[in-house]
Each structure stands twice: as C-alpha cells, then as structure tokens.
C-alpha cells in the first residue's frame, strides 16, 4: 500500500464525520447533538494523533458544513481513515464509514472515541467497513498503524481477523505528556479557526489540553472513566507556554485561549505557574475549574490573564452531589463563587437535572441555587448515562434506563426515569430552569448592559438569543 511521499506512513485521513443538520461539536468531540446555542469545540482528540502522522490531514466536517457527498472523494486519496465517534452519533458515523468504504474498497478504516473504547466488539460488528477500533488513549496506537505495523503487534486495538474479533493488550497510559507534539500546527494547517465558537468564550478562540485525566470521581463524567483516567497527567509548564506562544504567532486574531483539561485546577501550583507565564505573554485565557479553588489562587490566576472559569455546579442539593461523588460542598461552592465575583472572574456555570436522587423538590432547589449564585451564563443538561460510566452501570442495575441519549431530531432527551420522577418531567424542567434564570429582570439588565458597550458582542448576543429561543421552541413536543 502506498505511503505519504518520503514519510514511510500510510496516507492518513483523520475525520470528524458529517452529521445531520444542526449537529454541533458539543463538549469535546461529538459529545451530543443540538444545543442551546450552536457551538463547536476544536477536534483536539483527532488533532493530536494527526500531529504524530506526517502527511496526514484532519477534516472536521460539521463546523465546515461538509456533507457525506463532500467528503466521499477523500476516500480515494487516502490509505487509512480514522473516524472519531460517540454514543449519540455512532449509528450515523457507521453510515459514513460504509459510504467511504464503498467509494474505496481498499481504504483501511478505524474508529476512535469513548464509545468504541467501551464497546469494541459491538462497534466492529456494526459494519464490515470498520477494520479496527483503538481503545482508550489512542495517539500512539494510530501512529503505529499509520506506520504500517500489523494490527496484532499494536497495543490497544481490537480488530477483525478471519471473522473473529481479537484484542491486543491494553496500551499503558502515556506518562511523558511532553512527548505529544503541538496541536496548533495541525489547527493552522487544516482548520478554519473562525468556524469554532462557544457562546461564553471570546471569538475567535483556541482550545487545547495541557494534561489528561481528572482526580474527581464523578459517576456521570465520561472521559476520566473511559479514556483519560483519574490521574492528572500533565505537560510541563514550559511545554504549554511554548505552544501558546506558537498559537499567538499562528493566530494573531485569537482573543482567548481555553484549556480544555477536565479540571485544570487539579494541580494548583502548576496552574499558578502557567498563569504567570501567560501573564508575561499577555494572553487572555479561560479553563475548566472545580468550585473549590481557594481565593489566593484565584487572585493569582486573575492577575495573570484569567477571564472565565467553566464550573460544574451540577445540583443545589448536597445529597445529589454526594450520590454522584462530586466531592463538593454547597457552602464551599458559594464561597468560591463570591470570591470570583469579588475578583471580577466571569463564570459559566453548568447544571445537570435528573441525576440519581432527583425529585421535583431538588429541581426547584437547584433552580433557586443557580439564581442565588448568579453565574454570568449557564448550561442546563439532562443527566446522560454514557456507557462505561458508573452512573450507567447503576442505571442498568436499578432499571432506570429508558430510551437513548438523543431523539430523532438530535435533541438531548432524558434517558433516566424514576418511579417518583418521569423522564418527561425531567425533560420539561430544563426549559423551566432556563426561563427562570435568564428571564429575571436582574439578568436581563446585566446582559443588556454588557451588550450596550460592545457592538460586536451585541450582534453576537442577538444572534445567539434567536438560536436560544428557537432551541426552546424545538424542544416543545
């Protein structure tokens, strides 16, 4: 089979497959479907192995508006295609795989992502077009396959062999995170960064990872339980700052950098060291954080360019937080939020309805809690029991599951239902939550005042507001 000229590697296509109209990038890669405001995250999980394979190409179809017909001709130009998939998008992604294989019968095709890491046999049985799946952390797994190594010699793969499905031993987690090349070079080569937008981040933005894994044990969280693990394995401070400096040269138009680590503040001294370096570079930045960062650290981060924290509050009921092993106390979260407000740190708060222990009363308590905390913006999700998570196993054991994670329109639906709280009630409570939070005079005035001073922001917020209203309308039966 031919290889990229002079590299000794197979000509490799990394593809985020096209999907149905309205699909967006979700949180991470192909996480779920239609959201309140259409948003696209960077395909970092594909960009990382793409950076390891010379001559490769990364195609991110949804933000580029590409259809299956648009990407089919690529099948004839490559020897190997690697598709990122997820539980909500898997059935659609299989159709794309079949179409690519039909276009080029000689194309080798594999899939990566949490879904196939948890269910490799089911994935391989879904289509003869899928030759292999790479389990768990797949960067160097894909590199070795692209180098032409036989699948039985590559750690961390499951593959079909004469009608049988075989599994090679697991690949150990990567310890030397500095061994990973920079993803911003791939962004520069293959992506249009203006196509990536998140409602609460400045536009245009760039996001990347400075480490993998999360020390928290939240039962609902997908990536630490399937791919990243519960040890926070990090790149060195210098390595991170070098990539950010490079990103500034590649993308002088970027207004904000977002660190997409599950919990960037898991290592406070390191976070402070990176912040000081970013301050010297003059970078505006944001990150994921747990609502327990001490005031002293928050002040250092703010003094060195921090603008926004993405914070998972999840619930206003302590019992529910304990049920899902959040490791967070409500009083600590309140104190953290007051500190952020005092320091001028913006918060985008996320909440989840329908977690184990949810009742009509706890939903009401969470709505009141969100209004009390009053983060700048919020996201309200329905509890999503992804395969491979402790919450999914608990839901199966207790008979709570019913239905998929998204409906035929691509809207998130409640896969969990309880004898005392139906899936319909959980679904309907999302709209109630949004309306009560955003339609308060205090919040309306605050957002209007923000827009009044920035014409570009005004245009963006009006556009997003229309999307938000349309989202609420679409959710109605």
Image (cartoon, rainbow, N blue to C red):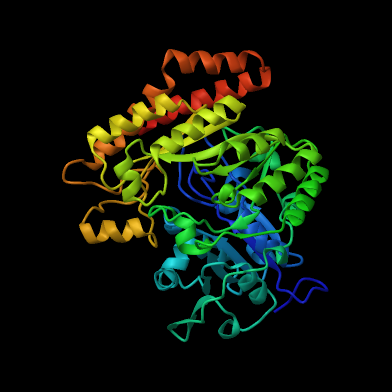
Answer with left or right where residue 284 lies relative to residue 468: right
Residue visible at 45% across and 36% down in the picture = 333
How far across and down, in percent of the image, does residue 110 sit?
Answer: 55, 69
Answer with left or right where residue 54 lies relative to residue 357: right
Asked whether residue 166 appears in the rendered view, the answer is yes
How far across and down, in percent of the image, does residue 91 sit?
Answer: 42, 58
Q: Quadrant of the C terminus?
A: top left
Residue 298, above or below 274: above
Q: Quadrant of the N terminus?
A: bottom right
Residue visible at 43% across and 84% down in the picture = 163
Residue 221, above or below 292: below
Front in this rendered view, residue 97 or 190:
190
How many numbered tags mark residues here?
A: 0
Write down the quadrant of residue 455 in the picture.
top right
Q: Residue furthest left?
A: 419
Front in this rendered view, residue 450 or 460:
450
How far across and down, in percent of the image, does residue 180 sit?
Answer: 70, 64
Write down the quadrant of residue 58 in the picture.
bottom right
Front in this rendered view, residue 318 or 133:
318
Asked whether residue 73 appears in the rendered view, the answer is no
How far across and down, in percent of the image, does residue 143 sit?
Answer: 67, 72
Front in this rendered view, residue 441 or 50:
441
Residue 221, above or below 381: below
Residue visible at 55% across and 55% down in the picture = 17
Q: Residue furthest front?
A: 296
Residue 5, above or below 386: below
Write down the quadrant of residue 413 in the picture.
top left
């Amino acid at each position: 089979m031919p290889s990229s000229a002079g590299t000794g590697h197979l000509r490799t296509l990394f593809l985020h497959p096209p999907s149905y109209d309205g699909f967006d990038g979700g949180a991470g890669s192909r996480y779920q479907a239609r959201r309140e405001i259409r948003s696209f995250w960077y395909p970092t999980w594909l960009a990382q192995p793409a950076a390891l394979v010379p001559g490769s190409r990364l195609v991110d179809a949804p933000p580029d508006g590409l259809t299956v017909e648009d990407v089919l001709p690529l099948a004839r130009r490559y020897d190997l295609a690697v598709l990122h998939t997820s539980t909500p998008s898997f059935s659609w992604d299989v159709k794309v795989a079949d179409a690519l294989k039909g276009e080029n019968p000689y194309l080798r095709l594999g899939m990566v992502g949490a879904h196939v890491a948890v269910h490799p046999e089911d994935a391989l049985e879904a289509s003869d077009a899928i030759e292999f799946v790479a389990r768990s952390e797949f960067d160097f797994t894909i590199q070795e396959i692209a180098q032409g190594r036989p699948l039985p010699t590559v750690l961390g793969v499951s593959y079909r062999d004469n009608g049988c499905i075989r599994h090679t031993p697991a690949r150990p987690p990567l310890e030397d995170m500095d061994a990973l090349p920079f993803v911003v070079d791939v962004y520069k080569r293959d992506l249009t960064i203006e196509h990536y937008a998140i409602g609460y981040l400045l536009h245009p933005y760039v996001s990347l990872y400075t480490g993998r894994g999360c020390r928290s044990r939240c039962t609902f969280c997908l990536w630490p339980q399937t791919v990243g693990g519960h040890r926070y394995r990090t790149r060195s401070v210098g390595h991170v700052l070098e990539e950010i400096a490079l990103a500034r040269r590649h993308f002088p138009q970027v207004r904000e950098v977002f660190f997409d680590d599950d919990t960037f503040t898991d290592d406070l001294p390191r976070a402070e060291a990176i912040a000081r370096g970013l301050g010297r570079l003059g970078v505006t930045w944001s990150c994921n954080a747990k609502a327990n960062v001490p005031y002293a650290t928050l002040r250092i981060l703010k003094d060195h360019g921090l603008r926004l924290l993405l914070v998972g509050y999840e619930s206003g009921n302590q019992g529910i937080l304990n049920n899902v092993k959040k490791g967070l106390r409500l009083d600590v979260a309140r104190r953290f939020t007051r500190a952020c407000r005092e320091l001028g740190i913006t918060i985008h708060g996320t909440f989840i309805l329908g977690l184990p222990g949810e009742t009509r009363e706890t939903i009401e308590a969470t709505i009141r809690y969100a209004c009390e905390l009053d983060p700048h913006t919020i996201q309200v999700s329905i509890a999503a029991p992804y395969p491979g998570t402790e919450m999914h196993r608990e839901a199966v054991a207790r008979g709570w599951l019913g239905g998929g994670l998204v409906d035929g329109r691509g809207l998130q639906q409640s896969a969990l239902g309880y004898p005392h709280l139906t899936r319909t009630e959980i679904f309907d409570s999302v709209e109630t939550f949004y309306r009560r939070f955003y339609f308060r005079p205090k919040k309306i005035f605050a957002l209007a005042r923000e827009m009044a001073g920035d014409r570009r922001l005004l245009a963006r917020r009006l556009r997003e507001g229309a999307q938000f209203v349309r989202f609420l309308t679409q959710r109605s039966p």
